[in-house]
Amino acid sequence: MGKDTLWQVEEALSECPKEHENILIEDPEDGIRRIVLNRPNKRNALSNSLRKELFSALEEADQDKQVKVIILSGAGKCFSAV
């Protein structure tokens, strides 16, 4: 694999959305990051795995200089059950 091809693969992978089991991450507009708790069948209760994903997503958004606003919401009928 040549340098140019490797660079194209790395660029394509960096643009792929990261898969999460318990949250959804969207960038609906420039500077806005939306993080959705996505366990509606459990009323978005904060399991250990959801917490890890959420903290990781918040840290990533905090370090991204393009992100100016973070919107946190819950899928389904409620934001979160604790």
Image (cartoon, rainbow, N blue to C red):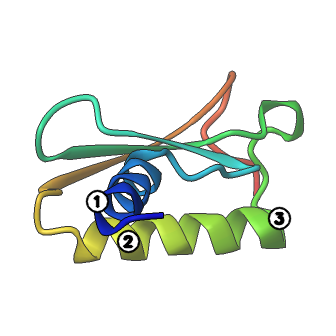
* Sooner in the amino-acid sequence: mark 3 or mark 1: 1
What's the residue at 69%, 39% (across, down)? 38
Would residue 22 be found to the left or right of residue 62 on screen?
A: right
For residue 60, which numbered disc appears in the image?
2
Residue 71 image position (x, y, % from top left): 33, 45
Please tell me the numbered disc located at residue 40: none
Q: Residue at x 27, y 73 (%)?
A: 62
Which residue is label 3 attached to? Answer: 47
Residue under pointer 1: 4
The residue lying toward the viewer, choosing from 11 and 25, is 11
Instruction: Determine contact: label 3, label 2, CB under 8 Å.
Output: no
Q: Comparing marks 1 and 2, which lies closer to the viewer?
A: 1
Q: Is residue 1 left or right of residue 2?
A: right
Could you give the CA–CA distance between mark 3 and mark 1, rounded to whole angstroms? 43 Å
| Residue density around tag 2, few if under 14, some if 14–19, many if 20 or more, within 10 Å | few
Q: Residue 54: horizontal and vertical position, in percent?
A: 57, 64
Say which quadrant the C terminus sits in.
bottom right
Please state the horizontal and vertical placement of residue 56, each as a whole percent of the image. 53, 73
Mark pair 3, 2: CA separation: 20 Å
Asked if 20 appears above or below 41 in the picture, the reply is: below
> What amino acid is at disc 3?
Ser
Q: SS for tag 3?
A: loop
Residue farthest to the right?
41
**Looking at the image, do the residues carrying marks 1 and 2 touch, with CB atoms under 8 Å apart?**
no
Work out whether 50 lies above or below 21.
below
